[in-house]
Image (tube, rainbow, N blue to C red):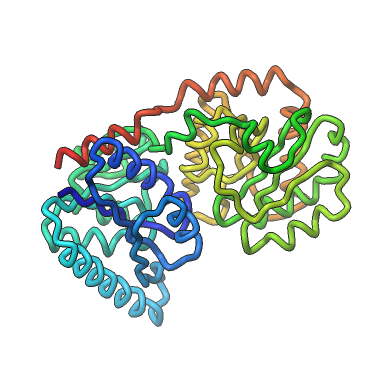
Amino acid sequence: MSHFYFAGGGTGGHIYPAIAVAQELSRLEPSCKITFFCSERSIDVRVLQPGGYRYVPLSVRGFTKNPVKLFSFVYSQLSARSEVIRTIRSDGDDKPVLLSVGGFVSASALLAAHKLKIPAAMLNVDATPGKANKLMARFARDIFVQFEQTTKSFGGNRSKVITTGCPLRAAFFNADGEIAIKALGLSPKKKILLVTGASGGAANINNVVGYLLDRLNGFAADWQIVHLAGIVHFDAVRTLYRQAKINHKVLDYYDDMPNLLAAADIAIGRAGAMSIAEFAASKTPAICLPYPYHADCHQRLNAQYLVEAGCGVIVDDLCDVERTSEILWPALEELMNSDEKRRDMRENCGKIVNPAAAEQIAQKLLSY
């Protein structure tokens, strides 16, 4: 019996692409088994539980250059590797296959697969792979990427790279915005500005939008806001909206992103690879504020994909509320005022998505 193991976690951006592939594997081979090796972060459980998937949390620390903490990192990786080996051996299935989907959990699982001599592949949806993925690429039979330009980043392993696009759940391609509007009690007569910091929220984006609420109140007659604050930031964001006149719904997290994005007329968010793919698949005009603290600025490269296709705008997060708001507001105001511009951006979104990405990856894994 085929048993497909997915390794990765720590953010929804790592887990959701894996779920998309898992759904296709179950459709193509209904008898197959699925197991996720994930992190111990609460977001992993929250994303995986609704699907009923078996998951095994691994106690793994993130990489650090701190010499004092480096030992703990190495020890946790070796312990996690042993846990993965024990789990796969205990399951005893004839055809185990591993797909690494990123995050600090994935390295230990790839090492375990190498030890057990079972086929393993890697999914890298960011424009630029992190150091860990570059290092671990040697253990992957195939490397699936979202962007063609990512291929050159894998150097000597570039022959393994297959450009598929980002695997997305089927729900993104048959979404119904009316479902989200009814579920959230929104007005069907007003347009929707969606603010999201992805699964963990984004404090800088929260604060900038909060700073702009006085200006956004001027659009109260025609617009409403859905603000996904992040679990940690929920109370603070709710406080920001206390005096807001524009209709709004502040949530810590929302599970049904396909239908919510289908309902949205504009999205403001980070530029994680998963977010970029979801904006495009949902045909949602996006204003991206790439995460400013990554040394390689890979979220800016992700967002550039939307800009070049004509369906996104980049606004730099300057880590200062007033300065960022002054460059965000002109871009946002223009989009909110222009039905024509938003329509053009939606049409452009439809040209850059591969709805078959998850199926293509699943078919390849089934061939191992």
Q: Position of residue 227 (x, y in %)?
A: 69, 47
Q: Report the residue that reaches farthest toward the front.
A: 31
Up-down relation of residue 262 to residue 4 (above or below): above
Q: Which quarter of the rendered picture does the C terminus lie within?
A: top left
Rendered image quadrant of residue 361: top left
Horizontal relation, residue 280 to residue 324: left or right: left
Rendered image quadrant of residue 327: top right
Q: Report the residue that reaches farthest toward the bottom.
A: 68
Q: Position of residue 310 (x, y in %)?
A: 56, 24
Horizontal relation, residue 93 to residue 244: left or right: left
Horizontal relation, residue 195 to residue 138: left or right: right
Please report the residue visible at 56 percent of the width from the left and 42 percent of the height from the top. 257
Q: Position of residue 246 (x, y in %)?
A: 84, 41
Up-down relation of residue 223 to residue 324 (above or below): above
Q: In this rendering, does residue 243 appear at all? A: yes
Please report the residue visible at 22 percent of the width from the left and 66 percent of the height from the top. 87
Horizontal relation, residue 318 to residue 11: left or right: right
Please report the residue visible at 28 percent of the width from the left and 48 percent of the height from the top. 122
Front position in the image: 68 or 59: 59
Please report the residue visible at 32 percent of the width from the left and 75 percent of the height from the top. 76
Q: In this rendering, does residue 138 appear at all? A: no
Q: Position of residue 207 (x, y in %)?
A: 73, 54
- The total of numbered circles placed on residues is 0
